[in-house]
Amino acid sequence: MYLGIDLGTSGVKALLIDGSQKALASGHAALDVSRPHAGWSEQDPAQWIAAINEAIGALKRSNPVQLAAVKGIGLSGHMHGATLVDSEDNVLRPCILWNDTRSHAEAAELDSDPRFRKITGNIVFPGFTAPKLVWVARHEADIFKRVAKVLLPKDYLRLWLTGEHISEMSDSAGTSWLNVAERRWSQELLEATGLEESQMPALVEGTQQGGTLRKELAAGWGMGPNVVVAGGAGDNAASAVGMGTVKPGQAFVSIGTSGVLFAANGSYLPNAESAVHTFCHALPDVWHQMGVILSASDSLTWLGGITGKKPEELTAELGDKLKAPGRVTFLPYLSGERTPHNDAAIRGVFTGLAHQSGRTALTQAVLEGVAFAFRDSLEALRTAGTELHRVTAIGGGSRSRYWLKSIATALNLPVDVPADGDFGAAFGAARLGLISAQKADPATVLTPPKTAETIEPDAGLTEAYGDAYRRYSALYPAIKGGT
């Protein structure tokens, strides 16, 4: 048996799978986010520990025999968080999370240093880890002086699980300290933020062993000795492992609260200027690129709140047949945008409104706006040298067939819909635990799910969607600075 632990922002999931990769049972526990000031977002790592104990406790009650047979554990977690510990591994302050924007000035300052984009292949975003440490140095100097290790959230869990200070490539690539091409810490960039490499965890690949479960935890959970803890992955890379998106040319589009267009690459292909994330994957010698939309299904949820309708009610009003884009255009920048603009200040707009623009026209415009935002990410990936021929759809928004048709036509790519199953980050983490414990060949383990159906682009609407995308693309420069 193998266990995947996914530390999400809103909760922890522990997923138990068997040797054939069949999901057997899962345990869950909720987490809260603290926002003591505007733009701040923090969590107490002690909550993570309590949540894991709760989630695994549920598995112990429901599946004690299977839990006792666990041989490998994989970890996944939200990226970019700054978890600071002293020389005795005591937490110095609450973890500063990925969606915390307090260090926007520090991020801009680091990004103006050309070494960061050159070495990491990425813009220094306010959510990344390095600017958070610069902020701590300036505003909490006493804490900064006591920092012995900087750990990403899932790697603080590893410390508790194993007693080891270890991270892996996919998560560490989101810190602005990793030489992403060479898969090692950059002493030059660490020094630029007042740190030393000794304050960083050791690095392994996601499929490699990253410690063994402490005996007292294994005994408490009813497990045997020598349970391997894999290197694991950041949440998006773990989801890709769960989907089997690990070979060049494979890609998925995630229509969640935020949106991701994720492509696996066999080489390092940075394109920082278009705000594409270029990170190491969870497998050796594999990288990945991501275009990131900050408000994907969140845009539809927002419209539902305004209209008093549930998102599924809004999409149902459109029917099943894809319509040509109307005159109403929506920019889904409700909380700024990452790819391709890297603009935290921009905000969403509707244009082309008329007296006859009813609720269905607004819903259609929202779905098209998010589809065109994915098209922006596709164009950014193409600029970096990545050409996609199809994508697999995941996330809550993928339940809308109309939205999938719109995205397929906007991208002009077939969209595969996977058969029912659990292919998320916890499943990907469990797969990494299996590979690490068994020293298995990743190629034989990380197969993609079966495709239930394929949504083809609507050839009759390709031209109309092309015209609407050009209209959409012209709006950002027209409103920039005026929102």
Image: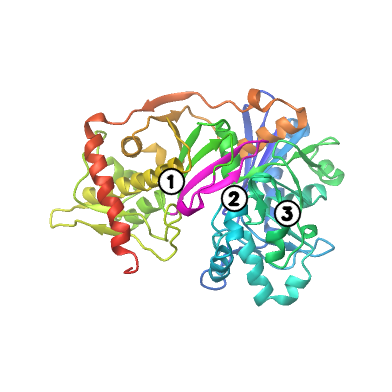
Q: Residue 8 carries which label?
A: 2
Residue assigned mark 3? 156
Q: Which is closer to the viewer, label 1 or label 2?
A: 1
Q: Name the residue under label 1.
A: 380
> Start and end of the magenta stretch?
270-294
Q: Residue furthest left?
A: 355
| Other-residue count near label 3 (Cα within 10 Å), few / some / many at <14 / 14–19 / ≥20 | many
Q: Quadrant of residue 210?
A: top right
Q: What residue type is labelled 1?
A: Ala
Q: How crowded is mark 2: few (under 14 residues within 10 Å), some or many (20 or more)?
A: many
Report the Cα–Cα distance between label 1 and label 2: 28 Å
Residue at image coords 34%, 68%: 481
Task: Tell me, yes or no, whether the highlighted magenta stretch contains residue 289.
Answer: yes
Tell me residue 457's x, y (percent): 31, 31
Q: What residue type is labelled 2?
A: Gly
Q: Do the residues labelled 1 and 2 touch (CB within 8 Å)?
A: no
Which quarter of the picture shows residue 109? bottom right
Q: Which of marks 3 and 2 is nearer the N terminus?
A: 2
Look at the image and say whether residue 200 sits in the magenta stretch.
no
- Look at the numbered disc 1 and give the secondary structure of its residue: helix
Q: What residue type is labelled 3?
A: Tyr
Q: Nearer the viewer, mark 3 or mark 1?
A: 1
Instruction: Assess disc 1: are there few (<14), some (14-19) or many (≥20) residues with their C-alpha within 10 Å of its C-alpha.
Output: many
Vertical arrangement, residue 145 with respect to residue 160, above or below = below
